[in-house]
Protein backbone atom coordinates (compact mmCIF):
# COMPACT_ATOMS: atom_id res chain seq x y z
CA UNK A 1 0.00 0.00 0.00
CA UNK A 2 2.80 2.37 0.87
CA UNK A 3 4.59 1.61 -2.39
CA UNK A 4 1.44 2.40 -4.37
CA UNK A 5 0.93 5.65 -2.47
CA UNK A 6 -2.54 4.64 -1.32
CA UNK A 7 -2.90 3.77 2.34
CA UNK A 8 -6.35 2.32 3.07
CA UNK A 9 -8.07 2.26 6.44
CA UNK A 10 -6.93 -0.64 8.61
CA UNK A 11 -7.96 -2.64 11.65
CA UNK A 12 -4.95 -4.06 13.51
CA UNK A 13 -6.12 -7.09 15.47
CA UNK A 14 -3.74 -8.76 17.90
CA UNK A 15 -2.84 -9.38 21.55
CA UNK A 16 -1.29 -6.70 23.77
CA UNK A 17 2.31 -5.71 23.22
CA UNK A 18 2.56 -6.68 19.55
CA UNK A 19 3.20 -3.15 18.24
CA UNK A 20 -0.21 -1.94 17.03
CA UNK A 21 0.35 1.67 18.09
CA UNK A 22 3.92 1.65 16.80
CA UNK A 23 2.80 0.32 13.41
CA UNK A 24 0.24 3.12 13.14
CA UNK A 25 2.91 5.77 13.91
CA UNK A 26 5.33 4.25 11.39
CA UNK A 27 2.61 4.18 8.73
CA UNK A 28 1.81 7.85 9.32
CA UNK A 29 5.52 8.76 9.01
CA UNK A 30 6.03 6.64 5.90
CA UNK A 31 2.92 8.00 4.17
CA UNK A 32 3.54 11.60 5.21
CA UNK A 33 0.31 11.86 7.20
CA UNK A 34 -0.51 13.81 10.34
CA UNK A 35 -0.90 11.45 13.30
CA UNK A 36 -3.92 11.85 15.58
CA UNK A 37 -4.60 9.32 18.31
CA UNK A 38 -7.63 8.68 20.51
CA UNK A 39 -8.47 5.89 22.92
CA UNK A 40 -11.95 4.45 23.02
CA UNK A 41 -11.47 3.97 26.76
CA UNK A 42 -11.17 7.72 27.43
CA UNK A 43 -12.87 9.35 24.42
CA UNK A 44 -16.46 9.93 23.42
CA UNK A 45 -18.37 11.40 20.48
CA UNK A 46 -17.48 14.97 21.50
CA UNK A 47 -13.76 14.14 21.35
CA UNK A 48 -14.20 12.52 17.95
CA UNK A 49 -15.99 15.58 16.59
CA UNK A 50 -13.01 17.75 17.58
CA UNK A 51 -10.62 15.36 15.87
CA UNK A 52 -12.69 15.31 12.69
CA UNK A 53 -12.99 19.12 12.71
CA UNK A 54 -9.20 19.46 12.96
CA UNK A 55 -8.72 16.87 10.22
CA UNK A 56 -11.08 18.80 7.89
CA UNK A 57 -9.14 22.00 8.46
CA UNK A 58 -5.85 20.20 7.80
CA UNK A 59 -7.24 18.57 4.67
CA UNK A 60 -8.30 21.94 3.30
CA UNK A 61 -4.70 23.07 3.90
CA UNK A 62 -3.42 20.05 1.98
CA UNK A 63 -2.38 17.86 4.91
CA UNK A 64 -3.95 14.43 5.26
CA UNK A 65 -4.56 12.78 8.66
CA UNK A 66 -4.11 9.25 9.97
CA UNK A 67 -6.47 8.74 12.90
CA UNK A 68 -5.38 5.97 15.25
CA UNK A 69 -8.14 4.64 17.51
CA UNK A 70 -6.87 2.40 20.30
CA UNK A 71 -9.28 -0.21 21.73
CA UNK A 72 -11.71 0.60 18.92
CA UNK A 73 -13.93 -2.32 19.93
CA UNK A 74 -14.92 -0.37 23.06
CA UNK A 75 -16.86 2.14 20.97
CA UNK A 76 -20.52 1.17 20.64
CA UNK A 77 -22.19 0.66 17.26
CA UNK A 78 -23.43 4.24 17.01
CA UNK A 79 -19.98 5.61 17.81
CA UNK A 80 -18.43 3.31 15.23
CA UNK A 81 -20.92 4.58 12.65
CA UNK A 82 -19.74 8.14 13.30
CA UNK A 83 -16.41 7.31 11.59
CA UNK A 84 -18.02 6.29 8.31
CA UNK A 85 -18.72 9.64 6.59
CA UNK A 86 -15.22 10.94 7.42
CA UNK A 87 -13.55 7.77 6.20
CA UNK A 88 -15.61 7.77 2.99
CA UNK A 89 -14.92 11.45 2.36
CA UNK A 90 -11.19 10.93 2.85
CA UNK A 91 -11.03 13.29 5.81
CA UNK A 92 -9.10 10.65 7.77
CA UNK A 93 -7.38 7.37 7.12
CA UNK A 94 -8.56 5.23 10.00
CA UNK A 95 -6.27 2.76 11.76
CA UNK A 96 -8.06 0.98 14.59
CA UNK A 97 -6.42 -1.32 17.13
CA UNK A 98 -8.26 -4.09 18.92
CA UNK A 99 -7.47 -7.14 21.01
CA UNK A 100 -10.93 -8.57 20.29
CA UNK A 101 -12.20 -10.41 17.22
CA UNK A 102 -13.40 -7.63 14.88
CA UNK A 103 -15.94 -9.99 13.29
CA UNK A 104 -17.88 -9.83 16.56
CA UNK A 105 -16.95 -6.45 18.01
CA UNK A 106 -17.04 -4.10 14.98
CA UNK A 107 -20.05 -3.41 12.83
CA UNK A 108 -20.19 -4.61 9.26
CA UNK A 109 -20.27 -1.15 7.70
CA UNK A 110 -16.97 -0.21 9.33
CA UNK A 111 -15.34 -3.56 8.49
CA UNK A 112 -16.35 -3.22 4.84
CA UNK A 113 -14.34 0.00 4.63
CA UNK A 114 -11.17 -1.29 6.30
CA UNK A 115 -8.71 -4.12 5.85
CA UNK A 116 -8.14 -6.36 8.86
CA UNK A 117 -4.48 -7.12 9.57
CA UNK A 118 -3.83 -9.90 12.10
CA UNK A 119 -0.87 -9.54 14.48
CA UNK A 120 0.47 -12.52 16.40
CA UNK A 121 2.04 -12.66 19.85
CA UNK A 122 5.78 -12.10 19.52
CA UNK A 123 7.82 -15.29 19.35
CA UNK A 124 11.09 -15.94 21.14
CA UNK A 125 13.20 -14.66 18.26
CA UNK A 126 11.33 -11.37 18.12
CA UNK A 127 11.51 -10.92 21.88
CA UNK A 128 15.23 -11.66 21.87
CA UNK A 129 15.58 -8.98 19.19
CA UNK A 130 13.77 -6.50 21.43
CA UNK A 131 16.11 -7.33 24.30
CA UNK A 132 19.15 -6.79 22.11
CA UNK A 133 17.82 -3.39 20.97
CA UNK A 134 17.09 -2.39 24.57
CA UNK A 135 20.63 -3.35 25.58
CA UNK A 136 22.08 -1.36 22.68
CA UNK A 137 19.97 1.66 23.63
CA UNK A 138 21.09 1.43 27.27
CA UNK A 139 24.65 0.64 26.18
CA UNK A 140 24.88 -2.22 28.66
CA UNK A 141 24.00 -5.91 28.73
CA UNK A 142 21.41 -7.47 30.98
CA UNK A 143 23.18 -9.06 33.98
CA UNK A 144 21.55 -12.43 33.39
CA UNK A 145 22.82 -15.95 32.92
CA UNK A 146 21.63 -17.63 29.72
CA UNK A 147 18.82 -19.62 31.34
CA UNK A 148 17.69 -16.54 33.30
CA UNK A 149 17.51 -14.58 30.04
CA UNK A 150 15.32 -17.34 28.59
CA UNK A 151 13.12 -17.18 31.68
CA UNK A 152 12.70 -13.42 31.26
CA UNK A 153 11.50 -13.96 27.69
CA UNK A 154 9.11 -16.69 28.85
CA UNK A 155 7.62 -14.39 31.47
CA UNK A 156 6.72 -11.84 28.78
CA UNK A 157 4.32 -14.34 27.13
CA UNK A 158 4.66 -12.76 23.68
CA UNK A 159 4.07 -9.20 24.92
CA UNK A 160 6.90 -6.89 23.83
CA UNK A 161 5.78 -4.00 26.00
CA UNK A 162 5.72 -6.21 29.06
CA UNK A 163 9.19 -7.55 28.23
CA UNK A 164 10.61 -4.02 28.07
CA UNK A 165 9.01 -3.23 31.41
CA UNK A 166 10.57 -6.32 32.95
CA UNK A 167 13.92 -5.36 31.43
CA UNK A 168 13.79 -1.96 33.13
CA UNK A 169 13.06 -3.63 36.46
CA UNK A 170 15.96 -6.05 36.08
CA UNK A 171 18.43 -3.33 35.07
CA UNK A 172 17.39 -1.18 38.02
CA UNK A 173 17.54 -4.02 40.55
CA UNK A 174 20.69 -5.87 39.52
CA UNK A 175 22.95 -3.24 37.97
CA UNK A 176 26.59 -4.05 38.79
CA UNK A 177 25.80 -7.08 40.96
CA UNK A 178 27.14 -9.81 38.67
CA UNK A 179 25.27 -12.41 36.66
CA UNK A 180 21.79 -13.27 37.95
CA UNK A 181 20.75 -16.94 37.99
CA UNK A 182 17.41 -18.31 36.85
CA UNK A 183 16.43 -19.07 40.45
CA UNK A 184 17.25 -15.54 41.63
CA UNK A 185 15.31 -13.99 38.77
CA UNK A 186 12.30 -16.24 39.39
CA UNK A 187 12.25 -15.12 42.99
CA UNK A 188 12.47 -11.46 41.98
CA UNK A 189 9.78 -11.41 39.34
CA UNK A 190 6.18 -12.15 40.09
CA UNK A 191 4.74 -14.53 37.51
CA UNK A 192 2.40 -12.70 35.26
CA UNK A 193 -1.20 -13.92 35.07
CA UNK A 194 -1.63 -16.24 32.07
CA UNK A 195 -2.76 -14.49 28.90
CA UNK A 196 -6.41 -15.44 28.95
CA UNK A 197 -9.56 -13.38 28.50
CA UNK A 198 -12.54 -15.15 30.02
CA UNK A 199 -14.97 -13.01 28.01
CA UNK A 200 -13.13 -12.85 24.69
CA UNK A 201 -11.41 -14.97 22.08
CA UNK A 202 -9.14 -16.67 24.62
CA UNK A 203 -12.23 -18.12 26.29
CA UNK A 204 -13.56 -19.62 23.06
CA UNK A 205 -10.21 -20.62 21.56
CA UNK A 206 -9.04 -22.54 24.62
CA UNK A 207 -12.31 -24.39 25.23
CA UNK A 208 -12.27 -25.26 21.54
CA UNK A 209 -8.73 -26.60 21.89
CA UNK A 210 -9.75 -28.64 24.94
CA UNK A 211 -12.82 -30.06 23.18
CA UNK A 212 -10.91 -30.96 20.01
CA UNK A 213 -8.05 -32.54 21.98
CA UNK A 214 -10.59 -34.79 23.70
CA UNK A 215 -12.18 -35.60 20.35
CA UNK A 216 -8.72 -36.42 18.94
CA UNK A 217 -8.09 -38.86 21.84
CA UNK A 218 -5.10 -36.80 23.03
CA UNK A 219 -5.23 -36.82 26.85
CA UNK A 220 -1.90 -34.99 27.15
CA UNK A 221 -3.05 -31.99 25.12
CA UNK A 222 -6.48 -32.07 26.77
CA UNK A 223 -4.91 -31.86 30.24
CA UNK A 224 -2.70 -28.99 29.06
CA UNK A 225 -5.65 -26.91 27.82
CA UNK A 226 -7.59 -27.71 30.99
CA UNK A 227 -4.66 -26.43 33.06
CA UNK A 228 -4.36 -23.31 30.89
CA UNK A 229 -8.01 -22.45 31.41
CA UNK A 230 -7.97 -23.07 35.15
CA UNK A 231 -4.73 -21.10 35.57
CA UNK A 232 -6.31 -18.25 33.62
CA UNK A 233 -9.23 -18.03 36.03
CA UNK A 234 -11.91 -19.76 33.96
CA UNK A 235 -15.02 -20.86 35.88
CA UNK A 236 -14.45 -24.59 36.54
CA UNK A 237 -18.19 -25.26 36.36
CA UNK A 238 -18.23 -23.83 32.82
CA UNK A 239 -15.57 -26.40 31.93
CA UNK A 240 -17.58 -29.12 33.68
CA UNK A 241 -20.66 -28.26 31.62
CA UNK A 242 -18.66 -28.48 28.41
CA UNK A 243 -17.27 -31.87 29.45
CA UNK A 244 -20.82 -33.14 29.93
CA UNK A 245 -21.61 -31.96 26.41
CA UNK A 246 -18.51 -33.72 25.04
CA UNK A 247 -19.62 -36.99 26.64
CA UNK A 248 -22.80 -36.98 24.56
CA UNK A 249 -21.53 -35.26 21.41
CA UNK A 250 -18.28 -37.15 20.81
CA UNK A 251 -18.64 -40.42 22.74
CA UNK A 252 -22.30 -41.23 23.23
CA UNK A 253 -23.05 -44.95 23.39
CA UNK A 254 -19.47 -45.88 22.49
CA UNK A 255 -18.86 -45.57 26.24
CA UNK A 256 -22.07 -44.92 28.22
CA UNK A 257 -20.00 -44.35 31.37
CA UNK A 258 -18.61 -41.09 29.94
CA UNK A 259 -21.75 -39.14 30.79
CA UNK A 260 -21.80 -40.51 34.34
CA UNK A 261 -18.13 -39.64 34.84
CA UNK A 262 -18.62 -36.03 33.73
CA UNK A 263 -21.71 -35.57 35.87
CA UNK A 264 -19.81 -36.97 38.85
CA UNK A 265 -16.88 -34.63 38.14
CA UNK A 266 -19.21 -31.64 38.15
CA UNK A 267 -20.74 -32.71 41.45
CA UNK A 268 -17.30 -33.40 42.92
CA UNK A 269 -16.10 -29.92 42.04
CA UNK A 270 -19.29 -28.35 43.41
CA UNK A 271 -18.65 -30.22 46.69
CA UNK A 272 -14.91 -29.70 47.02
CA UNK A 273 -14.32 -26.39 45.30
CA UNK A 274 -10.87 -25.22 44.18
CA UNK A 275 -8.20 -26.52 44.08
CA UNK A 276 -9.22 -29.98 45.35
CA UNK A 277 -12.16 -30.33 42.95
CA UNK A 278 -10.01 -29.55 39.92
CA UNK A 279 -8.56 -33.07 40.06
CA UNK A 280 -12.03 -34.48 39.37
CA UNK A 281 -12.20 -32.36 36.22
CA UNK A 282 -8.76 -33.65 35.22
CA UNK A 283 -9.98 -37.22 35.74
CA UNK A 284 -13.03 -36.56 33.55
CA UNK A 285 -10.94 -34.94 30.82
CA UNK A 286 -8.53 -37.88 30.77
CA UNK A 287 -11.39 -40.40 30.75
CA UNK A 288 -13.13 -38.67 27.83
CA UNK A 289 -9.93 -38.43 25.81
CA UNK A 290 -9.27 -42.14 26.27
CA UNK A 291 -12.82 -43.29 25.48
CA UNK A 292 -13.78 -44.78 22.10
CA UNK A 293 -15.45 -42.05 20.03
CA UNK A 294 -18.79 -41.89 18.25
CA UNK A 295 -20.84 -38.89 17.16
CA UNK A 296 -23.77 -41.05 16.07
CA UNK A 297 -26.06 -39.63 18.78
CA UNK A 298 -25.08 -36.08 17.79
CA UNK A 299 -25.58 -36.53 14.05
CA UNK A 300 -28.78 -38.52 14.56
CA UNK A 301 -30.27 -35.82 16.77
CA UNK A 302 -29.35 -33.06 14.32
CA UNK A 303 -30.97 -35.01 11.48
CA UNK A 304 -34.08 -35.52 13.62
CA UNK A 305 -34.28 -31.78 14.36
CA UNK A 306 -34.11 -30.93 10.66
CA UNK A 307 -36.77 -33.52 9.84
CA UNK A 308 -39.01 -32.35 12.69
CA UNK A 309 -38.77 -28.74 11.50
CA UNK A 310 -40.01 -29.76 8.05
CA UNK A 311 -42.75 -32.19 9.15
CA UNK A 312 -44.12 -30.70 12.37
CA UNK A 313 -47.69 -30.92 11.05
CA UNK A 314 -47.76 -34.73 10.85
CA UNK A 315 -49.58 -36.81 13.46
CA UNK A 316 -48.20 -40.01 15.05
CA UNK A 317 -49.33 -43.32 13.49
CA UNK A 318 -52.73 -44.51 14.71
CA UNK A 319 -51.31 -47.48 16.61
CA UNK A 320 -49.08 -45.17 18.72
CA UNK A 321 -51.75 -42.60 19.58
CA UNK A 322 -53.15 -42.36 23.08
CA UNK A 323 -56.63 -43.83 23.49
CA UNK A 324 -57.90 -43.09 27.02
CA UNK A 325 -61.59 -42.80 26.00
CA UNK A 326 -64.01 -44.90 23.96
CA UNK A 327 -64.53 -41.97 21.58
CA UNK A 328 -60.85 -41.81 20.77
CA UNK A 329 -60.77 -45.57 20.28
CA UNK A 330 -63.71 -45.31 17.88
CA UNK A 331 -61.70 -42.77 15.89
CA UNK A 332 -58.90 -45.30 15.43
CA UNK A 333 -56.49 -44.22 18.15
CA UNK A 334 -54.44 -47.19 19.33
CA UNK A 335 -55.79 -49.53 16.65
CA UNK A 336 -53.37 -52.32 15.84
CA UNK A 337 -51.01 -51.59 18.69
CA UNK A 338 -48.92 -54.56 19.86
CA UNK A 339 -47.41 -54.53 23.34
CA UNK A 340 -43.74 -55.22 22.65
CA UNK A 341 -43.13 -57.06 25.93
CA UNK A 342 -45.70 -59.68 24.91
CA UNK A 343 -44.11 -60.35 21.50
CA UNK A 344 -41.45 -62.98 20.91
CA UNK A 345 -38.06 -61.25 20.86
CA UNK A 346 -39.52 -58.18 22.58
CA UNK A 347 -39.86 -56.14 19.35
CA UNK A 348 -43.23 -55.89 17.58
CA UNK A 349 -41.92 -54.33 14.36
CA UNK A 350 -44.36 -51.42 14.53
CA UNK A 351 -43.04 -48.11 13.18
CA UNK A 352 -43.18 -45.00 15.30
CA UNK A 353 -43.04 -42.56 12.37
CA UNK A 354 -46.03 -40.83 10.78
CA UNK A 355 -47.04 -42.98 7.77
CA UNK A 356 -46.25 -40.11 5.38
CA UNK A 357 -42.58 -40.24 6.32
CA UNK A 358 -41.87 -43.89 5.68
CA UNK A 359 -38.79 -45.16 7.53
CA UNK A 360 -36.03 -42.49 7.54
CA UNK A 361 -32.77 -43.60 9.16
CA UNK A 362 -31.48 -41.01 11.63
CA UNK A 363 -29.33 -42.93 14.12
CA UNK A 364 -26.44 -44.79 12.53
CA UNK A 365 -24.32 -46.41 15.24
CA UNK A 366 -20.55 -46.71 14.85
CA UNK A 367 -18.68 -49.93 15.39
CA UNK A 368 -16.84 -48.29 18.30
CA UNK A 369 -16.67 -49.51 21.89
CA UNK A 370 -19.99 -50.47 23.47
CA UNK A 371 -21.93 -48.95 20.58
CA UNK A 372 -20.60 -51.68 18.31
CA UNK A 373 -22.90 -54.11 20.13
CA UNK A 374 -25.93 -52.11 18.96
CA UNK A 375 -25.15 -52.33 15.23
CA UNK A 376 -26.40 -55.86 14.53
CA UNK A 377 -29.42 -55.61 16.83
CA UNK A 378 -30.56 -52.34 15.28
CA UNK A 379 -30.14 -53.73 11.76
CA UNK A 380 -32.36 -56.70 12.68
CA UNK A 381 -35.04 -54.45 14.22
CA UNK A 382 -35.08 -52.19 11.16
CA UNK A 383 -35.39 -55.22 8.86
CA UNK A 384 -38.34 -56.45 10.94
CA UNK A 385 -40.08 -53.06 10.63
CA UNK A 386 -39.50 -53.01 6.88
CA UNK A 387 -41.03 -56.47 6.61
CA UNK A 388 -44.14 -55.61 8.65
CA UNK A 389 -44.72 -52.45 6.62
CA UNK A 390 -46.25 -50.72 9.62
Image (cartoon, rainbow, N blue to C red):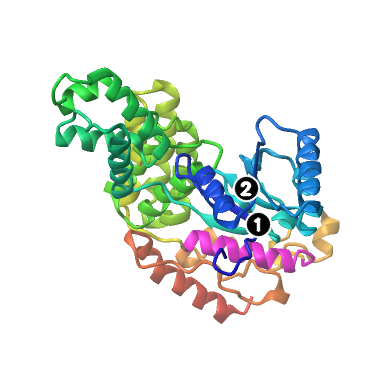
Find residue 14 and report its horizontal and vertical position in percent.
50, 47
Q: Is residue 210 left or right of residue 101?
A: left
Assign the N terminus to one quadrant of the image.
Answer: bottom right
**Extreme-front residue of the structure:** 61
Check disc 1: other Cα within 10 Å, few if <14, some if 14-19, many if 20+. many
Q: What predominant SS class does the magenta segment belong to?
A: helix
Q: Examine the image and state in which quarter residue 337 appears.
A: bottom right
Q: Residue at 42%, 32% (x, y): give it.
A: 232
Q: Kindly check if marks 2 and 1 are in contact, taking CB atoms under 8 A apart as contact.
A: yes
> Of marks 2 and 1, which one's residue comes earlier in the chain?
1
Find residue 294 and report its horizontal and vertical position in percent.
41, 61
Assign the C terminus to one quadrant of the image.
Answer: bottom right
126 in the magenta segment: no
Magenta-highlighted residues: 296-314
Q: Examine the image and state in which quarter residue 368 appears.
A: bottom left
Q: Residue at 27%, 18% (x, y): give it.
A: 173
For numbered disc 2, what is the local secondary structure? strand
Q: Is residue 152 left or right of residue 112?
A: left
30 and 187: which is toward the camera? 30
Q: Is residue 175 left or right of residue 340?
A: left
150 and 326: which is toward the camera? 150
Q: Give the Cα distance between marks 2 and 1.
A: 8 Å
**Disc ID at residue 96:** 2
Check disc 2: other Cα within 10 Å, few if <14, some if 14-19, many if 20+. many
Find residue 229 and report its horizontal and vertical position in percent.
41, 37
For numbered disc 1, what is the local secondary structure? loop
**Disc ID at residue 9:** 1
Numbered label tally: 2
Amino acid sequence: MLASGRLSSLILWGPPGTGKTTIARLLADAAGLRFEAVSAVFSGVADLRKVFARAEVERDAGRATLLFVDEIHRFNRAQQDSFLPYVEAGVVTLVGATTENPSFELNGALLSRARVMVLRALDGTALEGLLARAEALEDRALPLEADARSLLIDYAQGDGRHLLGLTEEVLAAFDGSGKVSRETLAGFLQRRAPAYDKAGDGHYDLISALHKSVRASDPDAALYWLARMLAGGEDPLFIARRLIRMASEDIGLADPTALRVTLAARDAYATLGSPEGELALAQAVTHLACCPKSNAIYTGYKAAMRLAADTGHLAPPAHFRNAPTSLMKSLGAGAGYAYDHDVAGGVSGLSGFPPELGRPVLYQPRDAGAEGRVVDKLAAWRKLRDETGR
